Image (spheres, rainbow, N blue to C red):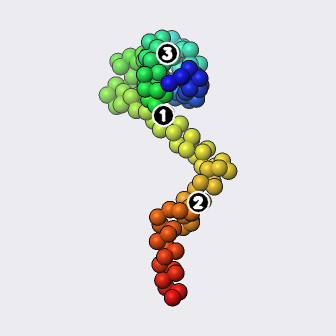
Amino acid sequence: MDLSQFVQSVAIYALPVLFAITLHEAAHGYVARHFGDMTAHAQGRISLNPLRHVDLIGTVLVPLAILFVSSGKFLFGWAKPVPVNYSALRRPRQHMAWVAAAGPAANLLMMDGSAASMTSTPAGVMRTAAAESNCTAPGTGAGRSARRSSSRASR
């Protein structure tokens, strides 16, 4: 992998990954605050500012190393965990389940929003329309067999 490809991969992946990590961690803190734990709020961790969630090793060094070693095909990292005081929650057992689920739920909502925005673009609409039609590209196997069948039927 040359340097220009590496820089391009970092530029393409960095912003969505930083946003996903930030939203994930902020969701944990927001739900914990909703159920009575003010720990994350008091530490300023309920924020969409990525700098509050960046862990030097897990958010910068490890992802860059993995991205470089995998030739830009794989990315993995983590952020600083949002502190949650289990005993400060009003109903600790039930509310901790909601706090834990909030981060992945935020990521799933972000994924759904991204998918919806991709299909609402003109190129996305065109891809969807082409996939739904029965047209095949010239030279594909299905197209040739369909043409052969129709030519035999006309004989």
Q: Which residue is mark 3?
A: 60
Q: Pick whichever, 28 or 12, lies toward us.
A: 12
Q: Secondary structure at mark 3?
A: helix
Of callouts 3 and 1, which one flags the residue occurring earlier in the amino acid sequence? Answer: 3
Q: Amino acid at mark 3?
A: Val
Q: Amino acid at mark 2?
A: Ala
Residue at image position (31%, 28%) is 93
Let me know if residue 12 appears in the view: yes
> What number of labels is visible?
3
Q: Position of residue 2 (x, y in %)?
A: 54, 22
Let me know if residue 32 appears in the view: no
How far apart are labels 1 and 2 at the CA level? 29 Å
Of callouts 3 and 2, which one flags the residue occurring earlier in the amino acid sequence? Answer: 3
Q: Position of residue 33 (x, y in %)?
A: 48, 23
Q: Kindly check if marks 3 and 1 are in contact, taking CB atoms under 8 A apart as contact.
A: no
Q: Which residue is mark 2?
A: 130
Between marks 3 and 2 in the image, the one whose residue lies nearer the viewer = 2
Q: Position of residue 38 (x, y in %)?
A: 47, 17
Q: Secondary structure at mark 1?
A: helix
Q: Amino acid at mark 1?
A: Asn
Vertical order, 100 against 113 (above or below):
above
Vertical order, 14 against 144 (above or below):
above
Residue at image position (54%, 59%) is 131
Between marks 3 and 1 in the image, the one whose residue lies nearer the viewer = 3
Q: Kindly check if marks 1 and 2 are in contact, taking CB atoms under 8 A apart as contact.
A: no
Q: Position of residue 100 (x, y in %)?
A: 39, 28
Q: Picture quarter containing residue 66? A: top left
Q: Which residue is mark 1?
A: 107
Q: Picture quarter containing residue 133? A: bottom right
Q: Pick whichever, 139 or 126, lies toward us.
A: 139
How far apart are labels 3 and 2 at the CA level? 40 Å
Residue at image position (53%, 86%) is 154
